[in-house]
Amino acid sequence: MIERVIRWGLRTAFRLLYNELAWAYDGISWVVSWGKWRSWQRAAVPHLVGPAVLELGFGTGNLLCDLAEAYHQVWGLELSPYMVGIAQKKLHRSGLSVPLVLGRAQSLPFATSTFDSLVATFPGPFILQLDTLTETARVLRTAGRLVMVPVAYQRRRGLVDRLLECIYAGTGQRTSPPWKKLLEPVGLCATVEEIDLAGSVVQIVTAVRN
């Protein structure tokens, strides 16, 4: 009973963080990652191919700004209107123009074979749903890539780090899905690797469209 209450509380907190409390997202992400959140996100960029790139669940738009500076054709998809508003302001301040779409990854409003790459960093459970994976494969071009950063963690773990790990585990974000088994049925051939990055470990999933 207590475990269910804790899980409910954590899910509620995450829902608020992605919506009404979206203004606090960047600060909280910085704190829980000891300032490494942005470098963890950027670890996905070298694995992308272009020129057409879509970010799924772009949050407050930090990675979108990086992508817009590296690729000619960038789009973003996000479910939270609060996040869309914050991202729009960041892009405007940076003098960047990126089409932002309010929608669900389970039903992508894009034509078949539109993108060379899709990227998702620290996505929610939606990324594991069959509808999401099927749609992802549909909008990718042949030999296109889905690149994900599902998890990262510190190598040195003190008391605070262990506490954070317990919170992540309570939200299901420390499970290790069988990525190859999940992606193969929709026509995506996946490789999973872990890279060392400034005293931390970042997991990167790269899935190529057959």
Image (cartoon, rainbow, N blue to C red):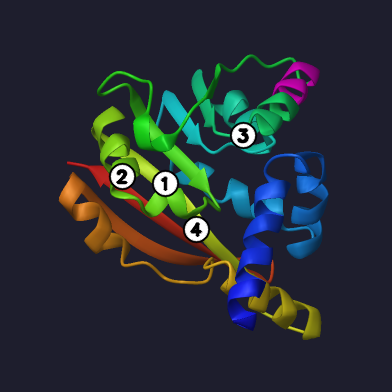
Q: Position of residue 166 (x, y in %)?
A: 65, 78
Q: Earlier in the sequence, mark 3 or mark 4?
A: 3
Judging by the rendered image, the residue that carries numbered circle 3 is 80
Q: Earlier in the sequence, mark 2 or mark 1?
A: 2
Q: Which amino acid does label 2 sit on?
A: Leu
Judging by the rendered image, the residue that carries numbered circle 1 is 147
Could you tell me which secondary element the residue under label 4 belongs to?
Answer: strand
Q: Where is residue 120 in the image (x, y as percent from the top left)?
A: 49, 44
Which residues lie in the magenta part? 88-93
Judging by the rendered image, the residue that carries numbered circle 4 is 150
For the residues marked 4 and 2, what is the alpha-carbon distance in whole angstroms?
Answer: 14 Å
Q: Which of marks 1 and 3 is nearer the N terminus?
A: 3
Q: Is residue 162 visible?
A: yes
Q: Earlier in the sequence, mark 4 or mark 2?
A: 2
For the residues marked 2 and 1, what is the alpha-carbon distance in whole angstroms?
Answer: 12 Å
Q: What residue type is labelled 1?
A: Val
Determine the residue positioned at 50% across, 34% down.
55
Is 158 inside the magenta-drawn segment? no
For the residues marked 3 and 4, what is the alpha-carbon distance in whole angstroms?
Answer: 19 Å
